[in-house]
Image (cartoon, rainbow, N blue to C red):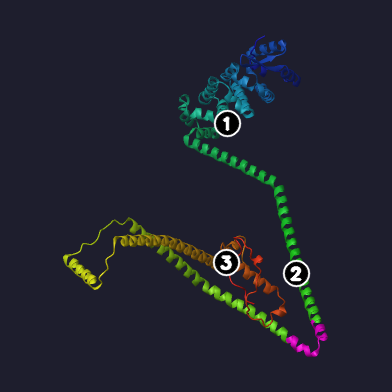
Amino acid sequence: MESNIHLSSLISQHDDEATRTSTLEGLEEGEVEGETLLIIESEDQASMDLSHDQSGDSLNSDEGDVSWREEQLSYFCDKCQKWIPAILRSDHFLHLLQTDNVQVGSTVMTMLQNILQISSGDLLRIEGKTLHSILNEVVFKLLSTPSPVIRSTATRLLLLMAESHQEILILLRLSACYKGLRSLLNKQEPGTEFSQELRHLIGLLSPKVYQEVEEQKLHQAACLIQAYWKGFQTRKRLKKLPSAVITLQRSFRSKRTKMLLKLSRQKEEEDRRLQLQLQRQRAMRLSRELRLSMLEIVHPGQVEKHNREIEEKSALIIQKHWRGYRERKNFCQQRPSLVEYKAAVTLQRAALKFLAKCRKKKKLFAPWQGLRELTDACRVELKQQVDDYIRRHPGSEVSGVINRELHSQAQERLQHYFMGRALEERAQQHREALTARINTNIEQLMKAPSLKEAEGKEPELFLSRSRPVAAKAKQAHLNTLKHIQAPWWKKLGEEARDEIDIPKDELSIELGTLFIGGTKPP
């Protein structure tokens, strides 16, 4: 049995459906040395096909036989697509394509068109030499065959190959083998039935049309990419629609909940305000009723006295608030000037200290310049003055012992003076330190806010490290507390009195006690 079967054996099959079915069932695909072989299951069927292939009369059948063969080839290509690469690589297919018979050549080229329409990618999978042979044969039939049927079929086949595969079109345009193809196609006779396909093929082979085709393909590719991208975006958006709806519902419900909560809080605030107003009115009514009941109990002669006491108390409260407001206003007005004054004093003190230090350094490091030399006239004048003084105040003669005693006394007095001078300097430094501390306390009190506005660390501004100041502050604080805790009837018509005596055990203070200067007026 032969390994390769001539393709014509497939053409010469019987017409009945049973024979075609049995032939297709008897074929299997196999791999032998990289080639796809068509193996026939039955040797009798293979020998019968070979005998049909060897008979030359089967190629010259009538037109009905040709149409039957075309139907057989179309059916074969439709049902046996997996054998198409083996058919294209077969030498028998190339021999059939190269035959001079018009019917056979037309049938084979028609089959090749059907193959390209069914599976166009198989044409590029064959070897380059075989592809060149097929292209050469198709171009030869188009240019050299006098039969219009062969030329028309070859034109359609070549046009289909150029349109289906960009590589074949580039090969026809740029290869040296087909250099004069376009000029030869232009010389073909116009007016034929395939002139439209011929013009289309010539247009594809021209560079301008090729560029237009390339641009059109790029445009189509861009449109396809955009369509895929828009579809992807649309599908993504559609997938997100349920979550978007859920998000909108959640936000709407949360907003509605917040609005209802706000309305309920407003309603509660309004109810609370109305309730407080009613309680206030009820308390005022009860107070007035109690006051009227007390007035009914009081003797008529005491009513006027009671009213006068109430008026005095009201006047005292009004005066207290007015004086406090006036003092606070004056203090706020004077505070910037006081701050400026304290700042000027601080700057002056610092400048004077700096100048004193500079002078002291100059005195310490100044070189000895010596005494100024006296002139002869000055010496004569000074000598004359000394002589006159001695003449007016004659001194008594003193012995050496007395001179030594006087000298020792002078030394003791000088030593006592220098020792006292050091103590005086230390005392002066202590006084300056106390003055600076007092100024610092005053500055802190000036910058400190009111007690109502004081916050976390601001109470530290009211602290003092001086024990006398702290003792005085605590005494003033206790006096103020006792004055505030006293009954109101003791304060009527009260004038400024001496300070209340405080026991000494209550003045036991430590460092860091609250500093409050002065006493609070009644």
Q: Main secondary structure of the magenta part?
A: helix
Q: Secondary structure at mark 2?
A: helix
Q: Are marks 3 and 1 in contact (CB under 8 Å)?
A: no
Q: Secondary structure at mark 1?
A: helix
Outermost bottom residue: 301
Which is in the foreground here, disc 1 or disc 2? Answer: 2
- Numbered-mark total: 3
Q: Secondary structure at mark 3?
A: helix
**Quarter of the image that includes the N terminus:** top right
Outermost top residue: 1
**Quarter of the image that includes the C terminus:** bottom right
Q: Which mark is first along the chain, 1 or 3? A: 1
Q: Amino acid at mark 2?
A: Glu
Q: CA gap, disc 1 to disc 2?
A: 84 Å
Q: Which residue is mark 1?
A: 164
Q: CA gap, disc 3 to disc 1?
A: 110 Å
Q: Is residue 304 part of the magenta span, yes or no?
A: yes
Residue placed most toward the observer, 73 or 422: 422
What is the x, y in percent for residue 483? 67, 74
Q: CA gap, disc 2 to disc 3?
A: 52 Å
**Is 123 located above or below residue 454 in the figure?**
above
Q: Which residue is mark 3?
A: 469
Q: Which mark is residue 313?
A: none
Q: Which mark is first along the chain, 2 or 1? A: 1
* Dot 2 crowding, Cα within 10 Å, few <14, some 14–19, many 20+: few
| Residue 385: quarter of image | bottom left
Residue placed most toward the observer, 128 or 453: 453
Please provide the residue range marked out in magenta: 291-307
Q: Amino acid at mark 3?
A: Val
Q: Which mark is first along the chain, 3 or 2? A: 2
